[in-house]
Amino acid sequence: MAKIEYMQSTFCSDLKPRARLVLQCLILHSNKEGTCFPSIKTIAAECGYGVTTVKRALDDLLEAGYIQKAPRFDERKNGGQTSNLYTLCAEMEKPTPSDGGENPPRESEPYRPYEAAFCGDTPTPRNSCAQPLAYTFADGMKAVSRRAKKAASVMWTGGQPILVPP
């Protein structure tokens, strides 16, 4: 599986954010065979996490089956342990297009900017803080106290008088 496919599958996973970021770091370090051996300190520095947090995230990834870990030892330095070897599992969940069975893929409408600009009733999204176009600064000032109105108008105009043509 290519690196981009691994990255896409991490976005679709149900991992915790820390495990997801550590997995993406491992993906960036991996070679064509899906193996890498960055140290825990390197992963922690690149992710902005502490060493303990990275260890927890690696444990989560091991339990979920996203990676395999193998210890590595240095023959030159009395057999001391070096960084672990991490192997990305090819069986990771990846988004697959539907085969037309239960839920066939939806087809989207082509984007038509001119139709959206000229149609009279454009729906506003639910739970939107967008106000209708008729909402103006003066309308908003009706709900504000007198002291706040003066401060707001100075901020709005930058201290310059507003000249409105007749």
Image (cartoon, rainbow, N blue to C red):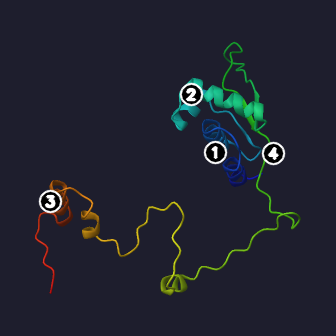
**Helix, strand or loop at mark 1:** helix
Q: Determine whether, in the image, residue 162 is placed left or right of residue 111.
A: left
Callout 4 environment at 10 Å: few (<14), some (14 to 19), or many (20+)?
some
Mark 1 and mark 3 residues within 8 Å of each other at the beta carbon: no
In the image, residue 91 lies at what x, y percent? Answer: 83, 45
Residue at image mark 2: 41
Mark 3 or mark 2, earlier in chain: 2
**Helix, strand or loop at mark 3:** helix
Q: Quadrant of the C terminus?
A: bottom left
Residue at image mark 4: 90
Furthest toward the right, the residue is: 101
Quarter-wise, where is residue 155 in the image?
Answer: bottom left
Kindly tell me whether residue 163 is visible in this rendering.
yes
Spatial separation of the CA atoms under disc 3 and disc 4:
64 Å
Mark 3 or mark 4, earlier in chain: 4
Q: Determine whether, in the image, residue 144 is placed left or right of residue 26.
A: left
In the image, residue 85 lies at what x, y percent? Answer: 72, 31
Q: Residue at x 57, y 25 (%)?
A: 51
Mark 4 and mark 1 residues within 8 Å of each other at the beta carbon: no
Residue at image mark 3: 150
Foreground label between 1 and 3: 3
Please state which amino acid type lies under the numbered disc 4.
Answer: Ala
Please state which amino acid type lies under the numbered disc 2.
Answer: Lys
Q: Residue at x 72, y 34 (%)?
A: 61
